[in-house]
Amino acid sequence: MIGPAVDRALDAAAGQVARGEEWLLGAKRATYGVAAVRVIFGLAAVWFLLANWSNRHYLWGDAGQWMSPLARNGGFGWPFTLFDGGGSQIEVTLKLLLVLALAVALTLGWRTRVVAPLLLVCWVSLIESNPLYGDQSDNIFRILLIYLCFADLSGRWSLDARRRARRAAGTGRRLLPSSVALPARAQRNVGLFGTLVHNFAVLAVAAQICIIYVASALYKVQGEYWQDGTAVYYPMQVGQYRPWPWLNDLLSANPFGVLVVSYFSVFIQLFFPLMLLRRSTRVVALLGVIAMHMGIAVIMGLPFFSLFIMAGDQIFIRDSTYAAVAGRFRTWRDDRRRRRRPAPVPDKVPALQ
Amino acid sequence: MSRVNPPPIAKGVAFFLVGVVAIHVAVTFLWNAPDNPIKESVSGEVSGYMRPFFQQNWSLFAPNPVNAEDELLVRAQVTDPQTGEVRTTDWERPTLMEWTLVHHGPAPSRASRITSNLHRRVNSAWNDLSDQQQEIMAADYLDMEDWEPLADDLVDAQGGETSSRVANMVRADRVATGYATQFARARWGEDVVAVQFQLRRTPVPRWDERHDPPENPSFTTREFGWRPVLVDEHQDEDAFADVLQGLDS
C-alpha cells in the first residue's frame, strides 16, 4: 500500500526536477520580455537625463557644492564614483553626454554585453552623487540592471540581433577576424551556461518585482488611511505631487473613487504573485499594476518611478504573447503597404522570396 | 517540448545556482518584510549583505501616506552698501519655488525635491535631540568662531559622549546653512552677513474636514538661530543663481 504511493511521489518529484532542468537549460526564457525591459529602461534613462538637463549643474555640478557636508556617495566605492564631488560645467556636461550615449546604445541594443555594465556603473555614480533627491525608482533601476547584466538583453529587437542574423546569413561584415574557434563541444557548453545564467537573471527580476509588490502591500495594510480607504486623497493635496491641480481636485472630490483606488492599490499589490499563477488572472494582475503606475505617473508626477517598475513587469508577459502581437503587427503593416502601393506587375516580382 | 540532455556538469551548476538565487531572494524578502522576530535576529547580516547594492525600501506612502507639505524657509541679514545699516529680509519660500517645476510638468526635474528633502533631513536630526540640545540649535551664532564649536556644546549637553545624533545634527545644520547662504546671495546679493532657516510643516486637511478646512491652515514651524554665511570653496555661485532665477520666473 505505502510502497507504490512513495514510488508515485518520488516519480512526481523526479518529474518536477526534470521540468525544472528543462526550464533552466532548455532555452532562454522571456527573451521578448527582457528586450522590452531593455528598451523601456533605455528610453526612460534618456528621458530622465533630458528632463534634468537644464538643472544639471545644480544637481550634479559645482552649483551643488553646498551639499558637501553630507556624505555624497551612498556607500558605493570605486568605480561608482564617477560623479562624486561635483565638477565644473564642462566636465559635468561631457560626463552626462557619455551617460546619454550609453542609454541610447542600450535602447537600440548595441553591444549590450558591454554597454549594460558600463551604464550600470555610470548611472549609479550619477544618481548616488546627490544625497538629496533620491527615490525608490533609483533602487529598482539599479537592482534590475544588476540582474539584467547577466541576461541576454539583445536577443530581440536589437542591433546586436540584426548583426548576428546577417552574419549567420553570410552577408554581415566583421570588424575583427573571428575569435579563436572553440571546439564544438566547448562552444555548446558555453552556450548552455549563457542560457542558464540568463534564466536565473529572469527569475531574479521576477522575484524582486513580486517582493516589491507584496512588501508595499504589507506596509500599507498597517495604515489607518489605507484601511478606511482615504489614503490616495492625502498625497494628492501636497504641492510636490500636484502636477495638474484640477485633475487632483477632480479625483479627490469623489469619495467612491478615492475608496476604490485606495483599496485597489493594496489588493493588486498583495495578490500580485498569486494572480501570476493562472493565465487569466495574470492578465488582470498586469493590467492592474500598469493602471496603478499610469495613475502615479500622471496624477502624482512621478513618471520615472512608474516607468522603471513597469519595465520590470514586462518580464511576466510570455514570449508566445509577444510573438503573436508582433506577428499581428507585421501582418497589419504589410497589408497597409500592399494597399498603399499599386499591385506589382507580375514580371517585376523579385525572384528571391 | 524539445528535450535537451544537458551534461551532468550543467545540472550541477544549475543546482548550485538554484541555491544561490534562493538564498538571495530569501534575504531580499527578509530585508523588505515589516519588522518580525527573524528579521530582528539576523538584521546585521542581512543589511551587511544588502547594502549598498541591493538597498531598497517599499514602505512608500505607507503605513500612512504623505499628508503634509514640508518646506524650508530662508531669510537673511543684509548690509546696505551705502548706509552700512543691517536689515533683515522677509522669509522666502524656496520649496514653493522648486514646486513650480512640478506644476504642469509631465516629467518634473529632480531639482523639485531638494529643499523638501533637506527639510526632512534637518527635521529628523532635530527630533533625535534632547530639549537642552534643541535650545542650543535654536540659538544665534553670528560668528564662525562661535558656530564651529557647536558640536562640542551638543556633546557636553549629553554628558560628554559623542554620538551619531550630534554628528547628524551638525551635518544637517551645516548643509542647510550652506543652502541658505547660496539662496540668500543669489537673492539679495553679496552683502549678506547672516542667514536663518526655518522648517515649516503644513498638514493637508483631514479627509473628513476637506469641505470645511480650518480657517487659517495651521502649520508648525521649527526655527533655527542665525548662522554666519558659509560658502564651500568649490561652489559655483553663478550656476546656482541661474537655476534659482529659472525657478523664479
Image: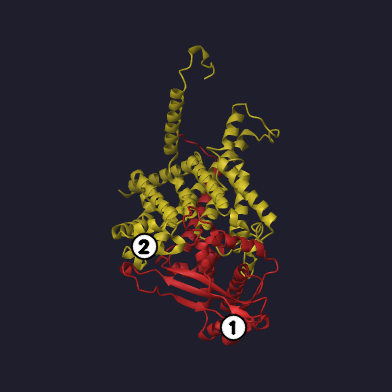
Chain colours: A yellow, B red
Disc 1, SS:
loop
Residue A287 shows in this picture: yes
Q: CA distance from mark 2 to mark 1?
A: 40 Å
In the rendered image, is residue B16 in sight? no
**Quarter of the picture holding the N terminus of chain B:** top left
Q: Mark 2 falls on what kind of element? A: helix
Q: Amino acid at mark 2?
A: Tyr
> Dot 2 corresponds to which residue?
A233
Q: Is residue A134 above or below residue B206?
A: above
Residue ranking furthest to the front: B82
The residue drawn where x is 66% and y is 35% is: A182
Q: Residue at x 43, y 41 (%)?
A: A318
Pointer 1: residues within 10 angstroms few (<14), some, or many (20+)? some
Tell me the residue at 46%/46% (across/down): A315
For the residues carrying marks 2 and 1, which lies nearer the camera in this image? 1
Read off the chain for label 1.
Answer: B
In the image, B73 versus A314, the foreground residue is B73
Residue lying at the far top of the rendered structure? A347
Viewer-nearest residue: B149 or A263 = B149
Q: Which residue is mark 1?
A: B140
The reply, left or right, for residue B138 in relation to residue A175 is left
Tell me the residue at 48%/13% (across/down).
Answer: A346
A212 relative position to A166: left or right? left
Spot occupied by residue B127 in the image (x, y as percentages of width and height): 50, 78
Left or right: where A272 falls relative to B142: left
Tell me the amino acid under the disc marked 1: Asp
Q: Are marks 2 and 1 in contact (CB under 8 Å)?
A: no
Q: Position of residue B78 (x, y in %)?
A: 62, 76
Residue A253 place in picture, x, y as percent: 32, 60
Determine crowd level at label 2: few under 14, some 14-19, many 20+ residues with C-alpha closer than 10 A: many
- Numbered badge on residue A25: none
